[in-house]
Amino acid sequence: MNTQTITLYNGVRIPNIGLGVYKTKEGTEVKQAIKKSLETGYRMIDTASIYKNEIGVGEAIGESDIAREDLFITTKLWNDDQGYETTLKAFDLSLKKLKLDYIDLYLIHWPVYGKYVETYRAFEKLYQEGRARVIGVCNFHIHHLEHLMDNSDIKPMVNQVELHPMLAQIELRNFCQKEQIQIEAWSPLMQGGEILENPIIKDIAKKYDKTPAQVILRWDIQNNIITIPKSITSSRIVENFNLFDFSLTEEELQKINTLDCHKRVGTNPDKYDFV
């Protein structure tokens, strides 16, 4: 096993790769995916209340012989639960479903206008109580982060956003680096989209006898981006983790950087319909 960690500004260390379980079915499917990931060497699992699989995630963790302190569990607050009191209730429910005493990383799933500041006050309370070791946000643009930081006491530690070579988020990454907010990438492989067929990526993959997916995930790691690939296929789970026996050159990193064209597979947070 060859995991690496990134130290957040509050001193907590977070693995630089995790297993995402978006759209992974509750029960056997999610449990088997997590079991395989833990066997492979993953130590971070990324779920959310809206994924409807927190119970299975919790059962898989409970059945593992890996010490709790060696695991890093992320879950997220859904839009309907935003608000101070409703956030605290939703957190308690997630904790109960996961059968955990604390969450390693708790994230606001989307910047619901008019609510996320109040919601984050509840996050600060959970952090101060030690029930969430790390607090942060998802899908926040720079203007969301600036507004939040102007109206809160504890700066978010993580911002999880759609990020891949065709949506490199350079301006946001630079801002977050300056503010010591760690970037995480969801949909790092564009949900298996066109990026895997890109000639630049394929040529680099051929050179290292790696897959296009491995090249992209390695690009994340070398750019200090935490990456959260999703899969329920055992061979893919293993493949996505085998990133630590090769490195991309600076020239190769720059070639991949040229693919940025601001192309999303998900929704732009400024255009998300929260109703």
Image: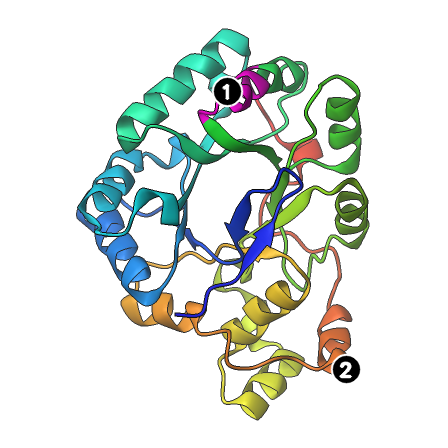
**Which residue in the protein does label 2 denote?**
251
Decide: few, some or many residues near mark 2? Use Cα within 10 Å; few <14, some 14-19, many ≥20.
Answer: few
Q: Position of residue 33 (x, y in %)?
A: 28, 56
**Residue at the spot 28% in from the left edge and 42% down from the top edge:** 57
**Residue at the spot 67% in from the left edge and 64% down from the top edge:** 165
The kind of secondary structure the magenta stretch mainly shows is helix
Vertical relation: 232 (above or below) 12: below
Q: Which mark is residue 126?
A: 1
Tell me the magenta residue range: 122-131
Along the horizontal axis of the image, is 87 left or right of 51? right
Q: CA distance from mark 1 to mark 2?
A: 44 Å
Q: Amino acid at mark 2?
A: Glu
Where is the N terminus found, in terms of image quarters? bottom left
Q: Position of residue 92 (x, y in %)?
A: 36, 19
Which image quadrant is residue 37 in? bottom left
Q: Does residue 21 appear anywhere in the picture? A: no
Q: Amino acid at mark 1?
A: Leu
Where is the C terminus found, in terms of image quarters? top right
Which image quadrant is residue 35 in? bottom left
Q: Position of residue 224 (x, y in %)?
A: 66, 59
Along the horizontal axis of the image, is 74 left or right of 257? left
Q: Position of residue 197 (x, y in %)?
A: 56, 76
